[in-house]
Image (spheres, rainbow, N blue to C red):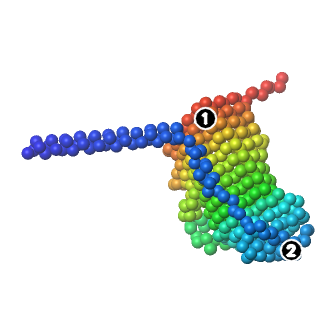
Amino acid sequence: MKMQKSECRMQNARRSILHFAFCILHFVALLLGFRALAASSDPWSAVPEILARIQPPKFPPRDFAITKYGAKSGGDATIAIDKAIKACAKAGGGRVVIPPGDWLTNPIRLQSHVDLHVEAGATLRFTTDTTKFPTVLTRFEGVEVMNYSPLIYAIDCEDIAITGDGTLDGQADEQHWWNWKPLGKEQPQTADRNALFKQNADQVPVAERVYGAGHFLRPAFVEPLRCKNVLIEGVTFRNSPMWVLHPTLSTNITIRRVTIIGNGPNTDGADPESCRDVLIEACVFETGDDCIALKSGRNQDGRRIDVPIENVIIRGCRMKAGHGGITVGSEVSGGARNIFAEKNQLDSPTLERGLRLKTNSARGGFIENVYARDIEIGNVMLAPLEIDVRYQDETGTFAPTVRNVLVERMHSLHSLHGVYIHALDKPSLRAIVIRDSTFRGVVAGHVIEGNVDLTMTNLDVEAAPKKQEKK
């Protein structure tokens, strides 16, 4: 009897060992199978399905010219624009037309089924009088806040657009808006920014985070919040107080043939945040910060709201100046996934990075499924590719992950470094692949720090010629 019990124990032990070994082998097989699938499958095959969902809104063939509501070129068109928008929405939709001329306005509130159409030869200028800005629900650097209205704002709308060949000028400069964050000087916004971020950390109700009048948190230029079916096409934006195009918690967004110019602080070009199904194509960026930055909320707010930025296609754009050309982060606590960038051109002595992924362990989040191909880069100050999960040396307990990044056929002519990666000591960067690319004129080689699963195949790195010393 004792022998039988002993044999049973031995058999059970053998079974346990065999089961454990089987599980390990099965896991390894799955992992190898996943990697093989990732290597053999074409992630770009998902693009047609995404594009099929991105359909610009259509508007009834009705025009509401602001001149019919009392606007006169050179004067204040605020009341006329508001009347035209309300009449257009009441009629079931159409175009509110800004004809050729010079027009001044307070912040604009769009409504559903309205296309704000700025014709060629028209310049729509926005007041810099902060007393004219109502307080609305918005986001400042990824944190929800009651703050100055964006210059053009919509909330809970569908089928909205800003189109035409005209110009929208935020009139920000060193005396208006930008002086709230002057370079190299004491910044009026610092106290408000710190207070808001503390409220975020303490999870103070958003209704109690009231800023706006008397405070110094700059608004975005355009912000559709919780909107569906958004089109921004053809127009030129100049001199934004802060981020220029900031769709937030919105779906089905097309940004096409837009030109963005302005070198103020934090004047990012296009910052879709916590949005789904976004197309950015054939745009020109000359900005004071990142040209395109994909975001999903900062720290506690990002994790509380928990809506990623996903299904984004960036193609045929030109980046002339900015911190990063195509950026994911840094406010990415809600995550980012399914990013496709192709056939973009980046070239400027003031452009700092080409493709830039950035977060840290205070912001956390995930960045996954990022695919870039056929990217042409001329001069870039730091590196064609940067992945930094120690951004700004902020630390916390929310270790970020970056996985499934494929860069192919990226070519650059001059940079300080080739690949620039700051990873954590623990595994955080997985399945990072660079292939069939050429980085020329590299001054100081690669910088790769931390625990990185990195594969570089057919990557040609040519050192910059050394400068000859003068005799």
- Which tag is nearer the camera, tag 2 or tag 1? 2
Q: Residue at left 29%, top 43%?
A: 19
Label 2 amino acid?
A: Lys
Using the image, determine if residue 4 lies above or below residue 235. Answer: above
Residue 367 is situated, as x and y percent measured from the top left of the image, at: 57, 50
Q: CA distance from mark 2 to mark 1?
A: 58 Å
Q: Circle 2: is it few (<14), some (14-19), or many (20+) Cα within 10 Å?
A: few
Amino acid type, mark 1: Arg
- Can you give x and y, in whole percent of width and height, for residue 442 in the image? 70, 33
Earlier in the chain: of badge 2 and badge 1, it is: 2
Crowdedness of circle 1 by 10 Å Cα count: few (<14), some, many (20+)? some
> Which picture quadrant has residue 190?
bottom right
Q: Which residue is mark 1?
A: 435
User: Does any portion of residue 280 appear in the rendered image?
Assistant: yes
Residue identified by numbered label 2: 68
Point 75% across, 38% down: residue? 378
